[in-house]
Image (tube, rainbow, N blue to C red):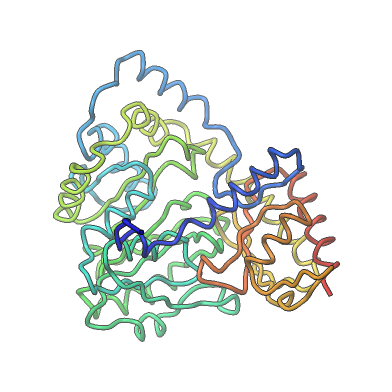
Amino acid sequence: MNQLSDRLNRLSPSATLAMSQKSNELKAQGVDVINLSVGEPDFNTPDHIKEAAKQAIDDNFSRYSPVPGYPALRNAIVAKLKNENGLDYTAAQISCANGAKQSVCNAIMVLVNPGDEVIVPAPYWVSYPEMVKMADGTPVIVTAGIDQDFKITPAQLEAAITPKTKALILCSPSNPTGSVYSKEELKGLAEVLANHPQVYIIADEIYEHINYVGKHESIAQFAEVHDRVIIVNGVSKAYAMTGWRIGFVAGPEWLVKAINKLQGQYTSGPCSVSQKAAEAAYTGTQAPVEEMRQAFERRRNLIVQLAKEIPGFEVNNPQGAFYLFPKCDSFYGKSVEGRTINNADDLAMYLLEEGHVACVGGTSFGSPECIRMSYATSDENIVEAMRRIKEALAKLK
């Protein structure tokens, strides 16, 4: 008899974590698996950040921190938003959490009532619709295919808004597609949202520094929506600090106070030592961020070039993050040795078992015609992985 809550039973397990686990199981059996399923940089945290963490331990930063994080860290984030993004916030408008994932969830939990609609452009990061469901809201999926570079248009946004719409979740640069909204594209969305004052914008900008178009653009820059934007960001991707678990929200003070109230009841402030490391990340040299960005850009160019050489793949040129999201539904219905590929998940499993390359099927990202590959790995791994994929797909008839 199922004793679990309806809330839990509504959720789907994370497909990205499930694929990672499956590839680890094969690795444990001695299979040489190249993992393109994982969404984290393969670099180590820069040394000056690690030194700050060691110093924090020696300085006894071992007690509870304030729920929204240490003032020094919040002030460092305020300075970052001003210097890098031209945005004015105060420390009272910043709340730090255990990763940007919790920050997104916090924003949804304090805003969404049962029956409220939250617009989620697809392809989306797997957790967005699940978090909306967790808050008893209704995810409203707006689909943007590869033909529009996986970005929704102002007309699509306008058509999706109803009196029940409470929020829009916008991720740029995007996981899983790597697409980046330009300033003009964001302005078009902001103009639509200006006419709907009940709609909040959760702007997930965690991949801000991994972009290949020059400057990151935030929808918070537009005055007509600024007071309704909740920026979510953190140190995970830019500084190779995924395991340190520090994210933040920047938004209207009344909303940040609500997030602090919520967080005060279920996790309190994030890890004290990680906060001191994050402070060093924001206040110290930014040279490692640019070095990593350049490496990701080189890998992007490499994987796009190799993917374009695979017959049956349709590929765009991602402008940020470290994902490629090829359209691969031309393989659906094809078979080899009695095994038929019916969908993206079948294809991802086939590539893992036949080609020993771990990718993630696009179904749980809201795009069943695609698969996600992370190129946060070495050039050698990318070359070998694409060779294996090409070989495995060539067997399908």
Count of numbered circles in the view? 0
Residue placed furthest toward the top: 58
The image quarter containing residue 27 is: top right
**Left or right, residue 31 beside residue 279:** right
From this view, report whether residue 135 is shown above or below residue 282.
Answer: below
Where, quadrant-wise, is the N terminus in this rendering? bottom left
The image quarter containing residue 11 is: bottom left
Residue 242 or 227: which is nearer the viewer? 242
* Residue at x-position 48% and y-position 25%: 48
Where, quadrant-wise, is the C terminus in this rendering? bottom right
Image location (x, y in percent) of residue 197? 20, 75
* Residue at x-position 46% and y-position 76%: 152
* Residue at x-position 49% and y-position 45%: 237
**Left or right, residue 214 beside residue 80:** right
Residue 25 or 136: which is nearer the viewer? 25
Image location (x, y in percent) of residue 334? 77, 76
Residue 327 or 16: which is nearer the viewer? 16
